[in-house]
Amino acid sequence: MRPPLVLTVAGSDSGGGAGIQADLKTMLALGTHGMSVLTAVTAQNSRGVLGAWELPVDAVRAQYRGVVDDIGVQAVKTGMLSSAELVETVAELLAGTDAPAVVDPVGVSKHGDALLAASALDSVRTRLLPVATVATPNLDEVAQLTGVRVESESDLRRAADAVLAYGPRWVLIKGGHLAGDAVDLLTDGTEEHWLRAPRLDNRHTHGTGCTLASAVACGLAKGRSVPEAVTAAKDYVTGAIAAGFPLGDGIGPVDHGWALGRDTP
């Protein structure tokens, strides 16, 4: 039988820990067929982003149409969309696609490098978030998009309301940057789900945001509800963080293949 079809629209990470590479690894590990639309090429390693080159809008549109019009898709995940023109193009494509969309509004890399032009923020708010089934911002991205700064768990609901005001059906506010347990809030403005996991003593967390959003898309492609898909994705990424490994001299990646029972050297 054909596996569920999931499409990622994101940038490339030459170090293999985040971006398109993390998305496709996650999709394989979770039993789906991953497909890709490349939006940018980055030169990066465990220490940071050395350079980034955006692809032309026509190239992004052609990749998307080529996949969706022939193969089809059951869920779409978006990641790095560095310019207003790219954001608006992808938002238009998503609006015309009959599949749930998981929007990871990537603003900065794990190393603090900017991946979204300031001029594109308004397009994310007014064009991309309104077509999202689930938006998955971290706390820095919440502040960037809404001005709401989360200092404690009690602020998560206010942050969620601020993002929901832009139109996504659901929002997952990722509270991993707070002290204590890793707590996230999933809500549609009425229904709330608080997702908790113990904070792990592992600094090798490159690619967590990409991995989580991709795992949510995999769950939706399998026909799960949003709460079911997000809960399963949280479990998957927690295991991937626990298995994260050193790579280079900086921050290593999570282990996308942890659930497959890979052999260790």
Image (cartoon, rainbow, N blue to C red):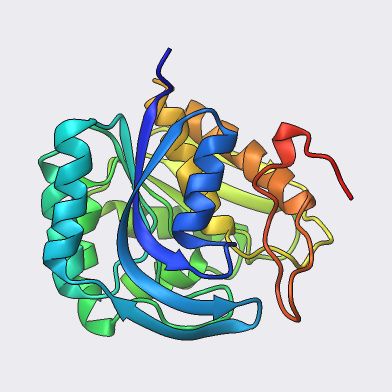
The residue depicted at 43 percent of the width and 52 percent of the height is 136
| Viewer can see residue 174 | no
For residue 245, which quarter of the picture? bottom right
| Viewer can see residue 16 | yes
The residue depicted at 42 percent of the width and 69 percent of the height is 141
- Nearer-the-camera pick, 114 or 59: 59
> Would residue 228 be found to the left or right of residue 94 on screen?
right
Q: Is residue 22 above or below residue 263?
A: below
Residue 164: image location, x then y, percent: 30, 51
Q: Is residue 65 above or below residue 85?
A: above
How many numbered dots are placed on residues in this image?
Answer: 0
Residue 183: image location, x then y, percent: 64, 50
- Nearer-the-camera pick, 135 or 159: 135
The residue depicted at 50 percent of the width and 66 percent of the height is 139
Quadrant into which the N terminus falls: top left
- Nearer-the-camera pick, 77 or 40: 40
Residue 143: image location, x then y, percent: 41, 73
